[in-house]
Amino acid sequence: MEPRSLYVHLPFCLHKCSYCDFTVRVLHQSTQIDRYLDHLELELQHIPQRYPLDTLYCGGGTPSLLNTAQFQRLHTLLNQAFDLSQLQEWTFEANPETVTPLLATGWKSAGVHRISLGVQSFDDQELMACGRTHRSEHVKSAVEILTQAGIAQISFDLIYGLPGQTLPTWEHTLEQALLLRPTHLSLYCLEVHNQTAWGYLEQQQRLDLPEDETLAQCYQLAVDHLQAAGYQHYEIANWCRPGYQSAHNLAYWHNVPYLAVGVGAHGYYQNRRYANPSSLTAYYAQCQQGQTAWAEAPPMTLQAEIEETVFLGLRLLDEGLDRAKFAQRFGQTLESVYPQTLPQLIHNGQLIDQGQRLLLHPDAVLTSNEVFSALLEPEGLTPEAAPN
């Protein structure tokens, strides 16, 4: 299957947030971006063919730090390497404080359909603790600028489980977000990683994190508020107004091939999961030498492909796993691959059997990792069936 989606990583930020574990570099001068685009051009030249794209996602980092000329150059490079004539969704990530009328107009003119704003919180104290450089009023201003530029699809990223966060402050964030009526919301539970500012504090037991019970209450509060506001809970961590699902992320959850370019970018191509180097020096060297990460990655085993397809598919709460599509893809039924596990999960009430589809039960969302763990090592798949 040919890839119909592309992820482009643009790693630069004005400041690294307290929780950030992404491939990010602090921007000191604009020429850093120019040099990065030089190497992105080299990488794009080694894409085997000019694939037509359905979805394009530019993430980071802070892609909105590209000035007008740099954005136009990026657009030109992508248009040379891919056929963008059939593009259905182009998402561009932005930090609220970086959105200007000039940039928004340029994004719209180039064909950007959707802006994903890194909002995280509407509590300014929480934003300062996160190391974010925007405040709540910047979000409102950004939404107004984008709307005036004609970009109607706006997504918010929000985080719950922040240090010192309480149910009332989380509820305030939800209420303020809903007042702005974004078309899409992604809600993430904070994960503290060792190589971050907060990871360092946690190792010293100096980080005041909410209890697990509070996290569950935060999640349920979001479920209730967003349902009441008419949002569709279509994926474990994602909600949208009807018809505004993230088409690009659906490609991930459907476990179909997609390309990814840029430092630290992860892709799925020619049945291989690959990752570009997370070091800029190593990434630049790879580009200069004409190497590609996907060519060096080992092919996936059948077992790994099945497991990922099952896990990712069950994250789609309305869609779930389609039995017929699974059988068509793998030449085996779900029941033959999981003859003991599936009936047990259905009997336990963790999965819902709708005949053609299997869905994760809403009450099992918070314990979904238990369901996914049970689906590791499918007992009906013989070792001989998996490629070496």
Image (tube, helix red, strand yellow):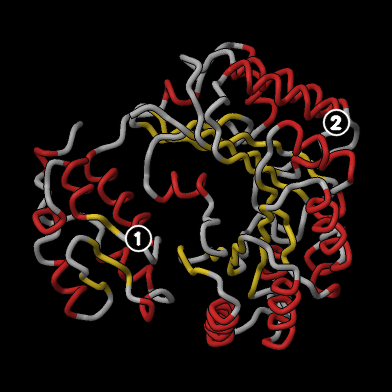
Res. 68 mark: 2
Res. 300 mark: none
Instruction: Name the residue: 55% across, 56% down.
Output: 244
Q: Local crowd at mark 2 within 10 Å, few (<14), some, or many (≥20)?
A: some
**Mark 1, secondary structure of its residue:** loop
Q: Local crowd at mark 1 within 10 Å, few (<14), some, or many (≥20)?
A: some
Can you tell which quarter of the image residue 59 is in? top right
Residue 204 coordinates in the image, percent (x, y): 70, 71
Q: What residue type is disc 2 on?
A: Thr
Q: Are marks 1 and 2 in contact (CB under 8 Å)?
A: no
Of 86 and 36, the residue lying toward us: 86
Can you tell which quarter of the image residue 91 is in? top right
Q: What residue type is disc 1 on?
A: Glu
Which comes sooner in the sequence, label 1 or label 2? 2
Instruction: Name the residue: 9% across, 38% down.
Output: 384
**Mark 2, secondary structure of its residue:** helix
